[in-house]
Amino acid sequence: MISNTAQQGTGMLAMFVNLDPRWRDDFRIWLKEDMFSARMNIGFNACASYDLLPETNAAKIPNPAFLTVYETASLGILYSEPYQALRRKRDTKDAAFHQRFLDAERYTLSWVGPELSAGTPGFLPFVYVDRFDLTTKNLQKFNQWFIDEYLPGCEEIESLVRLRRYTIIEGNRRVFLFHEFDDISAINDKAWNTLRGNEVWKNVAIDQGSSAAYRRVISEN
């Protein structure tokens, strides 16, 4: 279903990082026991952490190995005092992990409709993420194509359950596309490759390593 209203909220936080292998097991324990629970307690909708699927990387330079995402009812929650207090008053473990992050990229995101949506709450098992810039002269063409062709085309892909577009409020790019799949094998199908091969993408400034799929490892909602 293509919806002109946000079905799961209008705010999102996304964090891409690499980690030394010795910290990887503890990383997920820390997220689940500390980070996720603290954020759910102050009203976040859902949290999830994903592993990169290296074979889906769109360029030779890889994306960071880990993606963690947080969904909120509105962008305002990400600037509210309860959340900012969590960021200011990090405990010892929290501070230590943030120092261990490598190649970290943090994005504060605001929803831009319409979206391809489903009623299932929480984050789905697989995501495909695009982070890119658009020049002013290409904005209208891309936005029209996105509404008229890309969203309806994605709706025809059975395992592509949700697609949300965000404006990047904090982060080093301008546009953030967040596709959620039940089965990531759909990105090998003709329908997906036709959409992704459209000439409109030639006007999109996608840096090397900024489009790829990830597999969910842990979540909470």
Image (spheres, grey):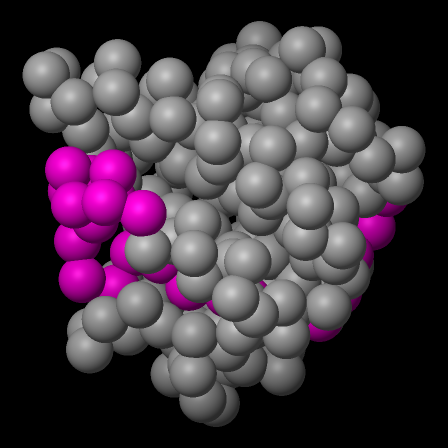
**Residue 35 makes an appearance in the image:** no
Residue 40 drawn in magenta: no
Image quadrant for the C terminus?
Answer: top right
Can residue 1 be seen here? The reply is yes
Q: Nearer the viewer, residue 185 or 71?
A: 185
Above-or-below relation of 145 to 16: above
Would you place residue 43 above or below residue 80 in this image? below
Give the residues in magenta: 198-221
Please give left or right for residue 172 compared with residue 25 in the image. left
Q: Whole-percent x and y of residue 25? A: 62, 83
In magenta segment, residue 203: yes
Q: Residue at x 43, y 74 (%)?
A: 56
Position in image of residue 44 (x %, y %): 74, 29
Residue at figure coordinates x 69%, y 46% from the top left: 156
Q: Find residue 51 and report its image quarter.
A: bottom right
Please give the name of the residue rendered at 23% of the width and 45% of the height, measured from the top-left corner: 199
Please report the residue visible at 40 percent of the width from the left and 36 percent of the height from the top: 176
Horizontally, is 176 left or right of 207 in the view?
A: right
